[in-house]
Amino acid sequence: MSRTFTPVQLIEQSIVRRYHEELWSPMCKAVKRYRLIQPGDRIAACISGGKDSMLMGKMLQMLQRHSEIPFQAEYLIMDPGYNPENRRMAEENAKRLDLPYTIFESDIFEVANAQEKNPCFLCARMRRGCLYGKARELGCNKIALGHHFDDVVGTTVMGMFYGGQLQAMAPKLRAKNFPGMELIRPLYLVRERNIVAWQRFNDLHFLQCACRFTEASGGNGHPQGGGKRQEIKELLRELKKVNPHVEDNIFASIHNLQLDTMVQWTWRGKTVSFLDEYDGWPEEKA
């Protein structure tokens, strides 16, 4: 007699079977490689309603069932000022994925969008602070965000091109203003194209950019004509036509920094120059 699976069971099967190598395996590899989860952790999976965070929350839930490392998870939706339709979509998708979520409200969109310059930066910073605060209230010691491989690569390039610095997106970091709290990124090794493929396979529909600033710009998901991050995506797409491995090489570069070729760097808030140690360096071989 054939077994009948529920919709959520079919979604879970697609993760561990059809997309095992594309989703499940790289997520587990990232957790192990970067030591993202420790025994006794209580993790707030921050599910904004978008495809990345929703998948991340679902896979953390599945990992909790099967992992040898005992940990707990909360599934946290923050409503920063969504319109009613977007809020309903976020909640319905959490239910469809069988994620027992907690939702709370804030006025972040209202505050950030009142700023004339860089509302996206302010919004992201405020959102993270609110998430840390609510996670700590729920007894969590970590928050998990849905940033993926493409975000890491894009952030690295954007920092060089528009920030004048070599700066990566770390797989985990300690919170400066919330002692004892940590941020982790379980999708660090997961490619965005594979998340999109999984979403389409399961006929799932998630939020795009749902902020009021984006809505005011025409609702295309990219405020101010697409934004710098979208420009970087398009640039990388063009570069891949010449070098298909360009994203892999950028990602590898942040794991293979040749510090003795750098002119100046910052370590724990202190600026260091190569001149500080230059006179004591051995001579280069001819």
Image (spheres, helix red, strand yellow):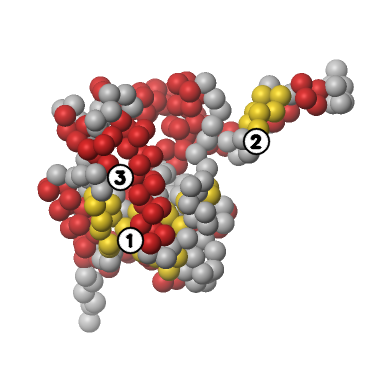
Residue 64, quarter of picture: bottom left
Mark in the foreground, 2 or 1? 2
Which of these two is toward me, 15 or 284? 284
Answer yes or no: is residue 243 visible: no
Residue 270, quarter of picture: top right
* Residue at position x 81%, y 23% in the image: 278
CA–CA distance in space, label 3 to label 2 = 37 Å
- Work out whether 102 lies above or below 209: below
Q: Which residue is mark 3?
A: 196
Mark toward the start of the polypeptide (3 vs 1) = 1
SS label for mark 2: strand
Mark in the foreground, 3 or 1? 1
Residue 224: horizontal and vertical position, in percent?
A: 26, 23
Q: Which residue is mark 2?
A: 267
Residue 254, quarter of picture: top right
Which of these two is toward me, 136 or 77? 136
Q: Is residue 12 left or right of residue 69?
A: left
Quarter of the image containing the N terminus?
bottom left
* Residue at position x 43%, y 32% in the image: 154
SS label for mark 1: strand
- Work out whether 135 lies above or below 193: below
